[in-house]
Amino acid sequence: MIGEFGRRTVLTALLVGGLLAAGATVAKPVGKLETVEVVTSKGRARFQVEIAATPAEQKRGLMFRKSLAPDRGMLFTYAKPQPAAFWMKNTLIPLDIIYIAPNGRVLSIVRNAQPHNETPMPAGGAVLGVLEIAGGRAAQLGILPGDKVLHRIFPKG
């Protein structure tokens, strides 16, 4: 005999399995959001971001998302500084990709990265994090290389 929890689990599995078999994609569930602030010459830009810390989370990133609110994003975090190059395979929306140096400063920005582009877009140096936001937002907010990014993974000051 299957209890209520078991019935819900089986129904959910059947629904998701049917959607996937029909070619639909299921977006990664949104976990706890964290705040990232970018201090620019125009002021502070604040984003609520999902954290992509594990290899699986980083591999999926914002793939298959059909939209991204102007104040949302994803922060890819690394345990130690490393080179990075992102691409847009299976990404449905344009993104601004902000590469962040170990000192918490914006190293470089790929503006309006085009969906489905499989060309690697390198950071140009070692990064400790990468912030993805909706395409065009970095220009709208005046985010530039050298701006300070505030988040728990970057040094204060």
Image: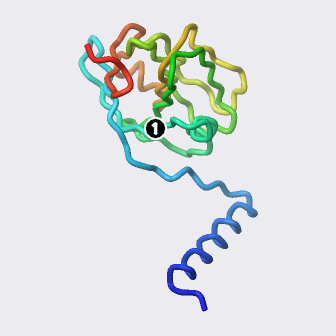
Q: Position of residue 17 (x, y in %)?
A: 69, 66
Residue under numbered circle 1: 51
Q: Residue at x 63, y 17 (%)?
A: 121
**Which quadrant would residue 71 be assigned to in this image?**
top left
Instruction: Farthest residue to the front: give it.
Output: 79
At 52% from the left and 23% from the top, the residue drawn is: 97
How far across and down, in percent of the image, does residue 70 sit? 39, 36
Q: Is residue 18 above or below residue 132?
A: below
Between 75 and 97, the residue placed more toward the observer is 75
Indicate the secondary structure of the residue bearing disc 1. Answer: strand
Q: Residue at x 62, y 14 (%)?
A: 122
Q: Position of residue 40 (x, y in %)?
A: 30, 15
Query: Which colour assignment does the render follow?
Result: rainbow
The answer to which image quadrant residue 26 occupies is bottom right
Query: Which residue is located at x 37 percent, y 20 percent?
Result: 154
Q: Does residue 46 appear left or right of residue 98 in this picture?
A: left
Residue, far bottom:
1
Q: Is residue 28 above or below residue 61?
A: below
Q: Quadrant of the N terminus?
A: bottom right
In the image, residue 149 sits, relative to residue 67, either above or below, namely above
Looking at this view, is 91 or 34 the one in front?
34
Question: How many tags in the picture?
Answer: 1
Location of the C terminus by quadrant is: top left
Identify which residue, 53 or 117, lies in the foreground. 53
Q: Residues within 10 Å of mark 1 (few under 14, many from 20)?
A: many
Residue type beneath disc 1 = Ile
Q: Position of residue 146 (x, y in %)?
A: 38, 7
